[in-house]
Amino acid sequence: MILNDYGRVVDEFWRAIPKHFPNAELGMFVVMPNHIHGIIVINELHSPVGATQCVAPTTTEPIQPRGPKPRSIGAIVGSFKSAVSYRLNKQFHVTNIWQRNFYEHIIRNDDEWNKIHLYIEANPANWRDDLENPINVKSQ
């Protein structure tokens, strides 16, 4: 893949994830023309010192958590998408670049890791036949 200006922003912010989330390590990833694939390893051993999952309430009313759990895959991807959106809007006046959610899969063993790693690595070579490629979208 040869990245355009937007792709270079996505690549830059993806590579910066571990700087903002010390508990995250990046595995294989690729920026495609209209989507990305990537492996994020969540390592709770690298969470900030003194970080806590729960905080005692200061009122007697139940606290309703908002947003994703801190340092979770949801928090990481949400922050990444927000940062990319902000930069692309500010620099190129581009909006609405992301789908609402994201696909996640927990990699449970080395065989899955290798299979997913190879899939991501091969994605650019398979772009011509990819169903995400706009040239392959059938008109309705």
Image: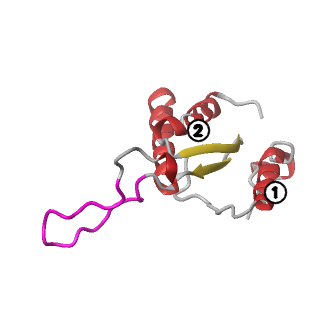
Is residue 60 rendered magenta in the image?
yes
Is residue 34 rendered magenta in the image?
no
- Residue under the image location 40 percent in, 54 percent down: 70
Q: Position of residue 95 (x, y in %)?
A: 49, 41
Q: Residues within 10 Å of mark 2 (few under 14, many from 20)?
A: many
Residue 84, above or below 50 = above
Q: Residues within 10 Å of mark 1 (few under 14, many from 20)?
A: few
Residue underneath mark 2: 14
Q: Is residue 120 left or right of residue 27?
A: right
To which quarter of the image does residue 113 belong? bottom right
Q: Secondary structure at mark 1?
A: helix
- Residue under the image location 45 percent in, 51 percent down: 71
Q: Secondary structure at mark 2?
A: helix
Identify the magenta region. 52-70
Label 2, label 1: how far apart the Cα atoms are = 21 Å
Image quarter (top left, top right, bottom left or bottom right) of the N terminus: top right
Residue 94 appears in view: no
Residue underneath mark 1: 115
Q: Amino acid at mark 2?
A: Trp
Image quarter (top left, top right, bottom left or bottom right) of the C terminus: bottom right
Res 2 label: none
